[in-house]
Image (cartoon, rainbow, N blue to C red):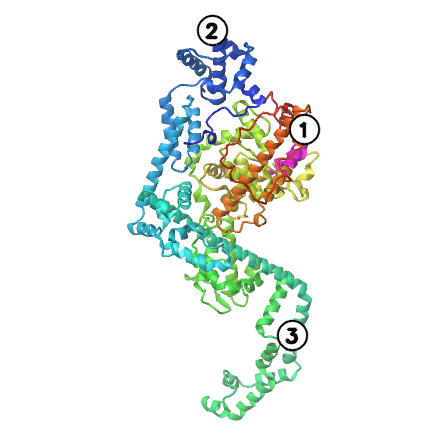
């Protein structure tokens, strides 16, 4: 059974504040008159008003005995009924009549049959992509409310969600099973068989290979081959939603082989198939990550080498000058060697022809005889003597070899050239050359595909693959069809390194290879190139919902976004005010400071949040100011509020080129510059909505998406549109921050509070200095959740201790103000002993119910905080 607390089904909160009582349960004069005209006694009057206010708040009728006592007493006092008056119906006919009166007043219909049909349709539709009953119930609730119908009881929603999910999941698993061949099913069944050591291949499937480091390439490559031998899992998962695959794989991962054998055969095979599919994607993710990290490391080292060259430039230049002087002595115009060469060059054409290819060790007579008498032995001997005297090229070669060889001299010249042009590219092959074989192996293991119509990078990579056996200095610049390979995607420096002016139609092989290893790694990172069969590096645009599906959900999405935005900027209206309480809770009791990636993952978590607290504000540290993150947070209904530092480096954007400001124009830079491209945003509106709704619906992970959108793609228009929207939202946020002292205080306080929480959490997780050594993502997540659970348990314990001490002080006659409690932190550690022996015999003892009441009037502080947030009780 689904816990009602995990859903949006309306219910009374366990603790209702005075503010909420006044806001939601105060009858108006008109309502009081309406109820008085329809009833004939105080008991019925109170009962009818409770029915009305409860329905207005929750959209359903509670049983009168379920209405909290504090609500009953509040309404009784509001309408000035005698003390002790209770809401009672002595006949069910009267209660039914009153429910009809309320329905008529609020304008809803009572049609349980139609409501159930709507619930079934919506749940069955959503169950094909989602798996949590709470999600189904929430979606069905919205549909029933939109139809203007009274909500069925929670048990109706819960039973239908469970039943339909079972049916849909069974259908999906049957489809996976049927798309597999009998041989493939048999292979998966063998995974559960135990070896002589008691282990199973199923455990190998669950346990990932070692981390994606270069030294683990062979392990990852073997794992990839083994997983691919199981079958093409992408065919098995055809038309199955990503969320379903993840959930099924998670169920298989949580079970051991013996537990799986208890499942029905079809379910057993389908779950293992999903786990295998996720494992195949993950190993490709690891290999792609390994490649991008390795290339980034090599580029960093090449740049560090360039910096070292700058420091050592003088020494290298002086050495090259000395070397050049030595070579010149052997070939200078006035020297004896050069004079001898000139004499030899003045010989007849026949002599030069005869000398071509001459072996120094060959007897002169034999050479002359072989030449057929064209050149006399005397002339031949004289020419040879002249060459020996001159030393020819051999003298120059010997001089260079004495200086370390041609390769070393070219390398030093290259280093000086690199320095002169900030030219780290020519140094990269020296770093990456040792990895050449592994790089080619990695490219063969992974299948790349373009995410746009631009194939230049992949075509260049394919050209390098065709010539990976080459060892010469140059390779052809033409492909198999005789067309020149297009490297216009490369920077000017790369083209300068790859092209040799003296070798038209050829590439410098080593620099070309370094370039084509670098470019795909960069484009995989930005999402311009995807890895087929990967999850993290897949073509994210294909994971988005179709526009027709998005269009169907767009109205509800925009309504919710507008309501959240209105509340955020202090303009609530009507039912939107229901969100104010949640926003208030989020602002003042649920602060989350973090860097940009923490912000992304927290937004991901908040989208899945099913608790009573519905945070709409994410506090981030200064690093959380990425423009695409601002855009995504806004489109998902969250207010990203980072602590702002380093103002000197921040850019404010104008709405148009002609916009100028009287007092703050300097913030926006040069007049006419830093202007928002509204046309781009408008042209990409559909794509922005597809992204936002797809993330909302769980079709794509926001963290996966942001890795692509914030990584600097030059080919993706959606990336540019997200950046542009982010510029708008961040500029507004910066201006709010500047003009609102209360906001600045709130952001600073939020960051400080949760930095204290982070410190407290680290103090709790003191084992191994808080370092999680396990490479298994599941084990990492467990460790983090256990730490969070223990941290919150200790905080709760501290809060109860603080409350008890406050009660004792109140009994002693002390006056406790809200401001006093605001200065007491629940992150107390002095009384906590992390070490030593702990008794376990009390674990089964049920603790007494904790007391929620604290006789401290928080109303002034509450109103002050609401005012600071831009809300007023009157609104």
Label 3, label 2: how far apart the Cα atoms are: 115 Å
Residue 495: % across, % down:
54, 60
For residue 319, above or below residue 394: above
The answer to which image quadrant residue 141 occupies is top left
* Residue 748 within the segment the image draws in magenta: yes
| Residue that extends furthest to the top in the rendered view of this protein | 40
The residue shown at (61%, 29%) is: 804
How many numbered marks appear?
3
Q: Can you identify the residue that label 2 sits on?
A: 40
Q: Which of marks 1 and 2 is nearer the N terminus?
A: 2
* Residue 73 within the segment the image draws in magenta: no
The residue shown at (55%, 56%) is: 296
Mark 3 element type: helix
Q: Residues within 10 Å of mark 3 (few under 14, many from 20)?
A: some
Q: Earlier in the sequence, mark 3 or mark 1?
A: 3
The answer to which image quadrant residue 655 occupies is top right
Looking at the magenta stretch, what is its main secondary structure? helix
Q: Which mark is residue 323?
A: 3
For residue 501, above or below residue 576: below
Considering depth in this image, is 29 or 132 the residue closer to the camera? 132
Q: Earlier in the sequence, mark 3 or mark 2?
A: 2
Label 1, label 2: how far apart the Cα atoms are: 48 Å
Mark 1 element type: helix
Residue 131: % across, % down:
41, 37
Q: Can you identify the residue that label 1 sits on?
A: 819
Residue 245: % across, % down:
40, 43
Please state, as top left, top right, bottom left or bottom right, where the N terminus lies in the image.
top left
Residue 280: % across, % down:
41, 51
In this rendering, position of residue 237 left or right of residue 80: left
Q: What stretch is highlighted in magenta?
A: 730-751
Label 3, label 1: how far apart the Cα atoms are: 80 Å
């Amino acid at each position: 059974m689904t816990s009602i607390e995990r859903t949006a089904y309306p219910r009374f909160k366990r603790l209702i504040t005075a503010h909420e009582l006044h806001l939601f349960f105060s009858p108006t004069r008109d309502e009081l008159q309406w109820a008085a005209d329809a009833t004939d006694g105080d008991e019925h009057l109170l009962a009818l008003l409770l029915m009305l206010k409860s329905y207005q708040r929750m959209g359903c009728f509670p049983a009168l005995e379920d209405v909290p006592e504090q609500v009953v007493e509040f309404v009784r006092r509001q309408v000035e009924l005698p003390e002790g008056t209770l809401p009672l119906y002595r006949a069910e006919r009267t209660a039914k009549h009153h429910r009809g009166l309320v329905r008529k007043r609020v304008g809803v219909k009572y049609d349980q049959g139609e409501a159930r049909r709507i619930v079934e349709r919506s749940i069955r539709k959503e169950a094909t992509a989602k798996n949590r009953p709470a999600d189904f119930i929430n979606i069905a609730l919205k549909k029933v409310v939109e139809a203007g119908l009274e909500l069925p009881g929670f048990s109706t929603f819960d039973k239908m969600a469970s039943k339909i999910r079972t049916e849909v999941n069974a259908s999906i698993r049957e489809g996976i099973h049927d798309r597999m061949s009998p041989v493939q099913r048999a292979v998966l069944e063998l995974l559960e068989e135990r070896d002589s050591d008691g282990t199973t291949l199923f455990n190998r499937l669950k346990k990932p290979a070692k981390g994606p480091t270069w030294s683990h390439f062979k392990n990852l490559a073997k794992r990839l081959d083994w997983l691919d031998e199981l079958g093409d899992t992408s065919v098995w998962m055809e038309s199955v939603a990503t969320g379903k695959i993840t959930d099924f794989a998670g169920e298989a991962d949580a079970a051991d082989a013996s537990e799986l054998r208890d499942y029905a055969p079809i379910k057993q095979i389908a779950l293992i198939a999903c786990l295998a599919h996720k494992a195949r994607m993950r190993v490709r993710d690891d290999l792609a990550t390994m490649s991008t990290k390795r290339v980034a490391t090599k580029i960093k080292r090449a740049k560090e080498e360039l910096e070292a060259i700058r420091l050592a430039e003088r020494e290298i230049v002086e050495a090259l000058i000395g070397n050049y002087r030595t070579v010149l002595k052997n070939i200078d115009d006035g020297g004896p060697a050069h004079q001898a060469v000139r004499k030899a060059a003045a010989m007849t054409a026949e002599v030069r022809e005869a000398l071509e290819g001459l072996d120094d060790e060959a007897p002169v007579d034999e050479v002359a005889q072989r030449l057929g008498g064209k050149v006399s032995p005397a002339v031949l001997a004289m020419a040879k003597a002249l060459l020996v005297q001159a030393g020819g090229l051999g003298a120059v070669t010997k001089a260079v070899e004495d200086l370390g060889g041609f390769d070393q001299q070219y390398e030093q010249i290259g280093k000086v050239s690199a320095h002169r042009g900030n030219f780290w590219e020519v140094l990269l092959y020296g770093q990456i050359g040792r990895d050449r074989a592994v790089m080619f192996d990695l490219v063969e293991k992974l299948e790349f595909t373009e995410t746009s119509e631009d194939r230049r990078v992949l075509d260049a990579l394919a050209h390098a693959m065709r010539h990976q056996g080459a060892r010469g200095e140059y390779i052809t610049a033409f492909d198999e069809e005789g067309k020149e390979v297009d490297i216009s995607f490369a920077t000017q420096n790369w083209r300068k390194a790859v092209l040799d002016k003296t070798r038209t139609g050829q590439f410098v092989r080593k620099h070309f290879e370094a370039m084509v290893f670098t470019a795909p790694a960069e484009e995989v990172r930005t999402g311009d190139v995807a890895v087929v069969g990967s999850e993290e590096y897949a073509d994210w645009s294909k994971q988005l919902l179709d526009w027709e599906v998005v269009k169907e959900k767009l109205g509800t999405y925009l309504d919710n976004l507008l309501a959240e935005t209105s509340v955020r900027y202090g303009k609530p209206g009507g039912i939107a005010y229901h969100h104010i309480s949640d926003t208030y809770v989020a602002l003042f009791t649920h602060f989350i400071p973090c860097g940009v990636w923490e912000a992304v993952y927290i937004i991901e978590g908040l989208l899945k949040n099913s608790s009573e607290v519905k945070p709409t504000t994410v506090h981030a540290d200064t690093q959380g100011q990425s423009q695409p993150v601002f855009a995504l947070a806004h489109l998902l209904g969250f207010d990203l509020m980072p602590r702002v530092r380093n103002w000197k480096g921040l850019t404010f954007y104008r709405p148009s080129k002609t916009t100028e400001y009287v007092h703050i124009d300097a913030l926006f830079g040069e007049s006419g510059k830093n202007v928002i491209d509204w046309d781009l945003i408008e042209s990409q509106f559909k794509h922005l909505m597809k992204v936002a709704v797809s993330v909302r619906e769980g079709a794509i992970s926001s963290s996966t998406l942001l890795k692509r959108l914030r990584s600097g793609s030059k080919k993706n228009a959606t990336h540019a549109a997200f950046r542009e929207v982010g510029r708008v939202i961040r500029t507004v946020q910066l201006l709010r921050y500047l003009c609102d002292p209360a906001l600045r205080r709130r952001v600073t306080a939020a960051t400080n509070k949760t930095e204290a929480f982070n410190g407290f959490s680290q103090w709790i997780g003191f084992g191994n200095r808080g370092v999680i050594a396990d490479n298994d993502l599941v084990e990492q997540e467990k460790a983090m959740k256990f730490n969070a659970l223990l941290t919150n348990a200790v905080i709760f314990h501290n809060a109860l201790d603080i409350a008890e001490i406050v009660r004792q002080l109140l009994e002693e006659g002390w006056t406790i103000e809200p401001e006093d409690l605001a200065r007491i932190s629940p992150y107390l550690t002095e009384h906590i002993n992390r070490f030593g022996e702990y008794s376990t015999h009390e674990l089964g003892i049920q603790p007494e119910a904790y007391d929620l009441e604290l006789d401290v009037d928080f109303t002034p502080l509450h109103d002050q905080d609401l005012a600071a947030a831009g809300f007023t009780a009157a609104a």
